[in-house]
Image (cartoon, rainbow, N blue to C red):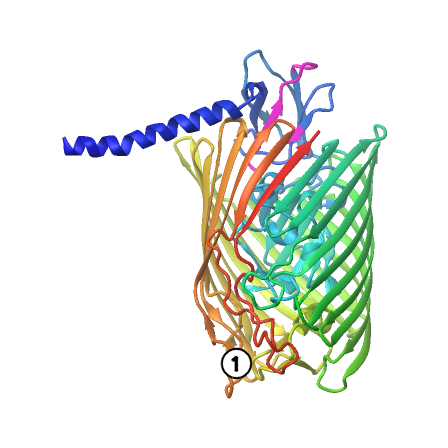
C-alpha cells in the first residue's frame, strides 16, 4: 500500500501536467495545422537535395528545401500542382491528390551543373557535402533560425567547428577560430567575393545581420585557388538573400533584457521576367547600460548600427548579372560609466560588387564569369587617451572561364587582381614616438588554373595552382592546392587535402582592439607576409539504422607556418611585441562529430575536438594563449508535426588553456584558465506566415571573474581589458517576432 501511495504521488502530478500541456497545445494550435503540405526532395539514389525551389504552379507561393531536403508549404486554393526545381536537376511537376499531406519528390540529374563557376550560379544556397570534393559544412536559413542569430558572429552557436569569442572586455570586438587558429587565417567571403579583412577584421563579424543571410558555407583546410591565396585554415562564405527567390516581404523584431532592440526588414520585387531587385534593411540599438559586476565599466558597449543592401538580378538567355550595394554606419560607446576613460569607435563602410556570367553551352558546362568589387571603410576610435584612425580602400576583380573537356574532365582558368590602400594614424600607442602616421599600398595580380577529374563521383581529384605577383613585397607567390575524394561505397566519403596559403598581416588594423589596455606596441615590421602549409584527412560515414541515418564525421588537420607575424604578449605584461617568426609554429586539430534523427522531429549533434597550437615565442616553443585544449559540444532539436513548435538546446564544454604571462614581480592574473560550460536554449512557435521565438543565452549565467585588470585605474600601467577567455556578460533572455509574405 505504501508503494501504491508513492506511485499515486508521482503519477498524479504527471497526469495533471499532461492535461495542462495538451490543453495549452489545443488552444495554441490553429486549424491551419492541417492546411500544410510537407515533403522531401531527393535524388534517385536517395540523397536529399538542399536548396530546391518548391512552388505552386501559376502562383508566387514557394519555399526552399532545407539541408535535409525537406520543405513545408501551405495548401493553395489556386493550384493543386507543385513545381520543383534545382540548378543541378531537371524540373518536374507533382500533382497533390486530395488528402495528401506528406510527399516524396525525386529529381533526376541534368548535365548543366554550374557548381564550379559560382559567379553565374542561379541559386547557390547550400552545398551538399556528400558531393563536394572539399570538406564543406553548411549553415542554411533554417539552421540560422535555431538561435537568435543577430549577426554573423552569432551564427555559429549550433556549429561545433567554429569558435567565437570576445577579443576584449571593453569594445565588444569578436573573433572566430577555425582549426584551432585565429580567424585571421580564415578567408571571409560574401557570395564568393573576398571581404571583411584589414580594418574590418576586429568588428566585421557584426557587419552582416543574421536575417540578411541565406546560408553560410564553411570550407575547412586549403580552399580553392579560384578565390585567391589567402585561405590557410579555410574559407567562410556568406550568401545573402537573393531577390529572385526570396520572400516578397519579411521582417524580424528582436528584443533582449539587456536592452538591445533590433529590427530587420527585406523586400523582393519582380520587375519583369528578367529583372529582380531586393532591399535589406537593419537597425539596432542598445538602450540600457549594463554593469552587472559593478566594476564601473560597461559589460558591453552601447552599439548603434544602421545597415542596408540594395541588390539587382538580371537574367536573359545565357547572361546573368548581379549588382549589390551595401552601406553600414556603426558607433560603439563604452568604457567607464562614471569617469574619464571612454571608448568611442565610429565606422562608415561602403561596398559594391558587380557579378556577370555567361553560359555558352549547358551540355559542356562552358561559362565565363567576371567579378568586380570595391569597398571603402573609415574608422575613428578612441580608447581613453589612445587613438587609432584608419581608412582602407579596396578593389578586387576576378575573371573565370570553365568548361568540361570530357565527361570526366573539367577545367577552370582565370585572372584576378586586388588592391588595398591603408592610411593609419596612431597616438599614444607605440613606446616611441607618441604618435605615428603610416600607410600601405598593396597590389596583387595573378593567374590560376584548377583541374577536376571526376570518375562517377566515386573518385574525384581537384588540383589547383595559382601564381601571383605582390608588388608591395616585390615577390612572386606560388600557391599549390590538391583535394582528393574517394567514395568506395555510397555511404562512405574519404577526403584528403593539402595546400599552401599566404596572408599579408596588417598589425594595427587587425589588432586595434588591443588598445583597450595600457600596453605599448613594439613593432619590428608593420606588414609581414605570412605563409603556411595546411593538410587534412577526413572521413564521413552514413550508417542506416532502421529508417534513420547516423552521420559520423572524423577529421584531422595540421597547419605548419613557414613565416608568421608573432603577436607576443608574454615577454612583457606591459607590452605587445610584434616580430617575424623564428622557429616553429603549428596547429593540430582533431574532431569527431555525429548527427542523427533519433525519432520523428528529434535530432542531435554531438562533437568532441582536441587542439594543440604551439608557437615559438621569445625563443621558446609554447602553447598559444587563449586556446582551449579541447571542446565538447551537444545540440538537441525537436519539432512537432508541421514544425508548429520547435525547441533547441545547445551546451558546450570549453577545455582550459593558458593565459599570457603576468608580471612576475606583481602578478595581476592567473597563468591558466579552467574548463567552463555554456548553454543556450530557444523555443519557436510558427503560425503560418509569422512566428514568435523566446530564448536564453548563457543559461547558467557564467562570466569571467574580474575580466578587466586594474579596472579601478584605467590610466595605470597595469590596466588591461584584453585578458579574456570567457563571456563578460551573463544570462541574456530575448524574444523575437518573424513575419514573411
Residues 124 and 326: in front is: 326
On the rendered structure, is 684 left or right of 409? left
Q: Considering depth in this image, is 340 or 660 the residue closer to the camera?
A: 340
Measured from the top left, where is residue 189 in percent x and y?
71, 54
Q: Position of residue 675 (x, y in %)?
A: 43, 63
Please rate how many residues cluster around mark 1, counting C-alpha atoms within 10 Å: few if below 14, some from 14 to 19, many from 20.
some
Rendering quarter of residue 76: top right
Q: Main secondary structure of the magenta part?
A: loop
**Measuring 78% from the left and 50% from the top, which residue is drawn there?**
400
As displayed, is residue 20 above or below residue 480? above
- Which x, y percent locates residue 470? 78, 69
570 vs 641: above or below? below
Q: Is residue 606 left or right of residue 618?
A: left
Task: Indicate left or right for 685 with 338 as reference.
Answer: left
Q: Secondary structure at mark 1?
A: loop
Picture quarter containing residue 213? top right
Q: Which residues are magenta?
A: 63-80
Question: Observer-nearest residue: 469 or 266?
Answer: 266
Would residue 243 be visible to someone looking at this image? no
Quarter assignment of residue 361: top right
**Residue 741 x %, y %:** 71, 29
Residue highlighted by disc 1:
662
- Picture quarter with the N terminus: top left
Number of numbered markers: 1
Query: Can residue 263 be seen at all in this image of the molecule?
Result: yes
State yes or no: residue 72 in magenta: yes
**Extreme-top residue of the structure:** 98
196 is higher (above) or lower (below) than 264: below
Vertical comparison of 182 with 220: above or below: below
Does 31 appear in magenta?
Answer: no
Seen as rendered, the residue at the extreme left is: 1
Residue at (75, 35) in percent of width and height? 362
Amino acid at each position: 500500500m505504501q508503494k501504491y501511495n508513492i506511485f499515486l504521488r508521482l503519477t498524479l502530478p504527471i497526469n495533471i501536467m499532461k492535461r495542462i500541456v495538451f490543453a495549452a497545445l489545443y488552444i495554441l494550435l490553429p486549424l491551419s495545422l492541417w492546411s500544410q503540405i510537407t515533403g522531401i526532395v531527393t535524388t534517385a539514389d536517395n540523397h536529399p537535395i538542399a536548396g530546391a525551389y518548391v512552388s505552386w504552379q501559376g502562383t508566387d507561393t514557394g519555399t526552399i528545401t532545407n539541408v535535409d531536403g525537406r520543405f513545408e508549404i501551405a495548401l493553395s486554393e489556386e493550384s493543386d500542382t507543385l513545381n520543383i526545381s534545382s540548378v543541378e536537376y531537371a524540373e518536374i511537376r507533382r500533382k497533390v491528390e486530395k488528402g495528401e499531406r506528406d510527399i516524396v519528390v525525386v529529381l533526376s540529374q541534368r548535365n548543366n551543373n554550374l557548381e564550379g563557376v559560382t559567379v553565374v550560379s542561379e541559386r547557390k544556397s547550400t552545398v551538399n557535402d556528400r558531393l563536394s570534393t572539399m570538406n564543406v559544412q553548411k549553415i542554411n536559413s533554417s539552421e540560422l533560425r535555431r538561435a537568435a542569430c543577430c549577426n554573423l558572429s552569432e551564427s555559429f552557436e549550433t556549429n561545433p567547428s567554429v569558435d567565437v569569442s570576445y577579443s576584449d572586455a571593453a569594445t565588444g570586438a569578436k573573433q572566430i577560430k577555425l582549426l584551432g587558429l585565429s580567424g585571421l587565417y580564415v578567408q571571409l567571403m560574401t557570395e564568393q567575393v573576398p571581404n571583411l579583412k584589414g580594418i574590418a577584421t576586429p568588428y566585421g563579424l557584426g557587419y552582416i545581420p543574421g536575417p540578411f543571410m541565406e546560408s553560410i558555407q564553411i570550407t575547412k583546410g586549403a580552399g580553392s585557388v579560384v578565390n585567391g591565396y589567402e585561405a590557410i585554415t579555410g574559407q567562410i562564405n556568406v550568401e545573402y538573400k537573393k531577390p529572385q527567390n526570396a520572400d516578397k516581404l519579411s521582417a524580424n523584431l528582436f528584443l533582449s533584457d539587456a536592452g538591445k532592440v533590433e529590427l530587420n526588414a527585406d523586400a523582393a520585387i519582380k520587375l519583369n521576367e528578367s529583372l529582380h531587385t531586393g532591399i535589406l534593411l537593419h537597425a539596432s540599438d542598445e538602450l540600457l547600460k549594463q554593469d552587472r559586476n559593478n566594476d564601473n565599466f560597461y559589460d558591453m558597449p552601447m552599439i548603434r548600427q544602421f545597415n542596408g543592401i540594395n541588390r539587382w538580378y538580371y537574367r536573359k538567355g545565357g547572361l546573368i548579372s548581379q549588382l549589390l550595394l551595401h552601406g553600414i554606419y556603426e558607433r560603439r560607446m563604452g568604457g567607464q560609466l562614471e569617469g574619464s576613460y571612454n571608448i568611442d569607435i565610429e565606422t562608415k563602410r561602403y561596398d559594391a560588387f558587380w557579378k556577370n556570367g555567361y553560359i555558352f553551352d549547358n551540355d559542356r558546362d562552358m561559362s565565363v564569369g567576371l567579378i568586380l568589387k570595391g569597398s571603402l571603410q573609415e574608422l575613428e576610435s578612441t580608447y581613453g587617451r589612445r587613438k587609432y584612425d584608419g581608412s582602407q580602400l579596396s578593389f578586387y576583380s576576378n575573371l573565370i572561364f570553365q568548361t568540361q573537356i570530357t565527361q570526366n574532365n573539367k577545367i577552370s582558368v582565370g585572372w584576378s587582381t586586388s588592391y588595398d590602400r591603408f592610411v593609419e594614424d596612431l597616438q599614444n600607442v607605440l613606446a616611441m614616438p607618441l604618435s605615428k602616421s603610416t600607410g600601405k599600398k598593396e597590389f596583387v595580380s595573378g593567374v590560376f588554373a584548377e583541374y577536376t577529374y571526376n570518375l562517377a563521383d566515386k573518385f574525384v581529384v581537384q588540383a589547383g595552382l595559382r601564381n601571383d605577383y605582390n608588388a608591395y613585397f616585390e615577390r612572386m607567390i606560388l600557391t599549390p592546392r590538391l583535394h582528393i575524394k574517394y567514395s568506395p561505397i555510397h555511404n562512405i566519403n574519404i577526403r584528403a587535402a593539402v595546400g599552401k596559403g599566404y596572408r599579408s598581416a596588417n598589425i594595427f588594423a587587425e589588432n586595434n582592439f588591443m588598445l583597450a589596455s595600457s600596453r605599448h606596441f613594439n613593432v619590428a615590421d608593420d606588414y609581414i607576409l605570412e605563409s603556411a602549409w595546411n593538410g587534412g584527412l577526413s572521413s564521413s560515414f552514413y550508417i542506416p539504422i532502421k529508417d534513420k541515418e547516423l552521420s559520423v564525421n572524423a577529421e584531422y588537420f595540421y597547419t605548419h607556418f613557414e613565416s608568421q607575424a608573432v603577436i607576443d604578449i608574454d615577454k612583457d605584461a606591459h607590452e605587445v611585441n610584434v616580430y617575424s617568426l623564428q622557429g616553429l609554429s603549428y596547429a593540430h586539430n582533431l574532431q569527431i562529430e555525429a548527427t542523427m534523427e533519433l525519432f520523428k522531429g528529434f535530432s542531435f549533434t554531438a562533437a568532441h575536438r582536441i587542439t594543440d597550437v604551439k608557437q615559438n615565442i621569445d625563443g621558446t616553443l609554447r602553447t598559444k594563449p587563449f586556446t582551449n585544449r579541447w571542446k565538447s559540444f551537444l545540440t538537441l532539436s525537436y519539432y512537432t508535426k508541421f514544425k508548429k513548435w520547435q525547441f533547441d538546446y545547445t551546451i558546450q564544454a570549453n577545455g582550459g588553456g593558458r593565459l599570457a604571462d603576468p608580471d612576475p614581480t606583481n602578478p595581476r592574473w592567473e597563468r591558466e584558465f579552467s574548463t567552463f560550460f555554456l548553454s543556450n536554449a530557444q523555443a519557436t512557435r510558427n503560425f503560418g506566415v509569422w512566428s514568435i521565438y523566446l530564448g536564453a543565452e548563457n543559461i547558467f549565467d557564467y562570466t569571467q571573474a574580474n575580466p578587466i585588470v586594474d579596472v579601478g585605474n584605467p590610466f595605470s600601467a597595469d590596466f588591461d581589458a584584453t585578458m579574456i577567455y570567457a563571456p563578460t556578460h551573463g544570462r541574456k533572455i530575448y524574444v523575437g517576432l518573424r513575419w514573411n509574405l
